[in-house]
Image (cartoon, grey):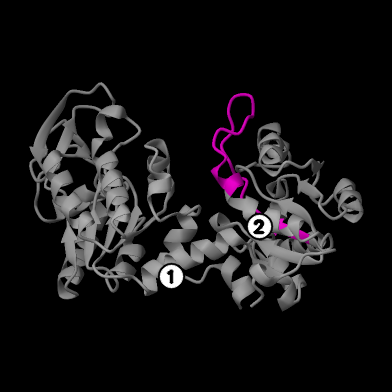
Amino acid sequence: MQMIDNYNFAGKKAIVRVDFNVPLGAQYEVTDDTRIRGALPTIKKVLADGGSAILMSHLGRPKSGPEEKFSLKHVIPALKGHLGVDIQFADDCIGAQADDKSAALKPGQVLLLENLRFYTAENKVKSDEEKKATRVFAEKLSTYADVYVNDAFGTAHRAHASTAVIADFFADDAKMFGFLINKEIMAMDKVLHQSDKPMTAIMGGAKVSDKIQVIENLLDKVDNLIIGGGMTYTFIKARGGEIGNSLCEEDKLDVATDLVKKAEAKGVNLILPVDQVLADKFDNEAQTELASIDEGKAGYMGLDIGARSVEALTEVIMNSKTLLWNGPMGVFEMPNFQKGTVSIAKAIAESTAKGCFSLVGGGDSVAAVNKFGLADKVSYVSTGGGAMLEYIEGKVLPGIKAIRG
């Protein structure tokens, strides 16, 4: 497999699949440039070698055709600010402008193509007819460049034109991962296959159903499995606890019971919160009460873990050598219910400072470490929520397979 580190892009045009699916403000300004910054090492390598970069990405979920709010031209100021070079723009990713500008591109220059998802052929790949259209679309994109680089880990779990199919049109030595995907894979492989013990996985979020396969796969790898967030209450109800109005997947009670049994059989320490912050409504200004985790109350819902839980979980985290965190402990978006998530994030950062390897992934967990200024205090922050979860589940990601084979 070709590695970007030892490839010379001199005189080459590289078409690079980046992930510029960034949040935009009311004036279409980029409000979080994390993903843009993540792509910079790869783009800079192409330019420094004397190559030119053709960048392609999606932005949002346009329903049918071009929409102003989903135009990638809005990311140009942020990208130019980081790269320090002019950014050319093609207002149609496979139109005449893209043809002409890619053909005329000179070493050291950058061309950004308009949103790939303005064409349904980018990501509609279910029927035979759609698959055929996707191949045609991918082949057209491939004609712009000599080399294909995939650096968009966040979409690597999708068999889309720009993330998987396009690789078919490049020789093995002319397709490769960018630096970002390489780092993602190394971080996940370290956690999954080369972890120092004890290893602790912290799974939060709303639903057990979103994490069943992840938890199943992790039970063969972890020493401790901490459950938090809304899905806690499915486990609590399954063991006979009172949960009041707390979130619960009634159809997953058997699944929760089964996971507890499997953890026990494998010698995994499955840890649930022991106390909670109850609220009489889903509102930052709600009336609150502290209660044991099994003692919910009619008309009240659990929106955060309590101080005793924080203390117990922090002890486990501080004694870990490898940590994986996916999902918050409560509704951290509300200031009155963020304490549990903040405390866990700080404990992970402190454990990392002591030498623990920590991987944080998933939209909410990443948002939490960014919000609390801790992103640079953990070992690695993954850019791909869904892709990371599927990788941890043990699935083969199409965007990875297209290059790895």
Crowdedness near tag 2: few (<14), some (14–19) or many (≥20) residues, C-alpha within 10 Å: many
- Please identify the dominant SS of the magenta region: loop
Magenta residue check for 179 = no
Crowdedness near tag 1: few (<14), some (14–19) or many (≥20) residues, C-alpha within 10 Å: some
- The tag earlier along the polypeptide, 2 or 1, is 2
Q: What's the residue at 69%, 61% (across, down)?
A: 161
Asked which secondary structure carries label 2, the reply is: helix
Coordinates of residue 34 in the picture (x, y in percent) = 54, 44
Tell me if residue 214 comes above or below residue 383 in the rendering: below
Q: Which residues are magenta?
A: 14-37
Quadrant location of the N terminus in the rendered image:
bottom right
Q: Which residue is mark 1?
A: 189
The answer to whether residue 257 shows anywhere in this view is: no
Coordinates of residue 317 in the picture (x, y in percent) = 23, 55
Side (left or right) of 377 relative to 110: left
Residue 42 is tagged as 2
In terms of depth relative to the viewer, which is nearer, 355 or 207? 355
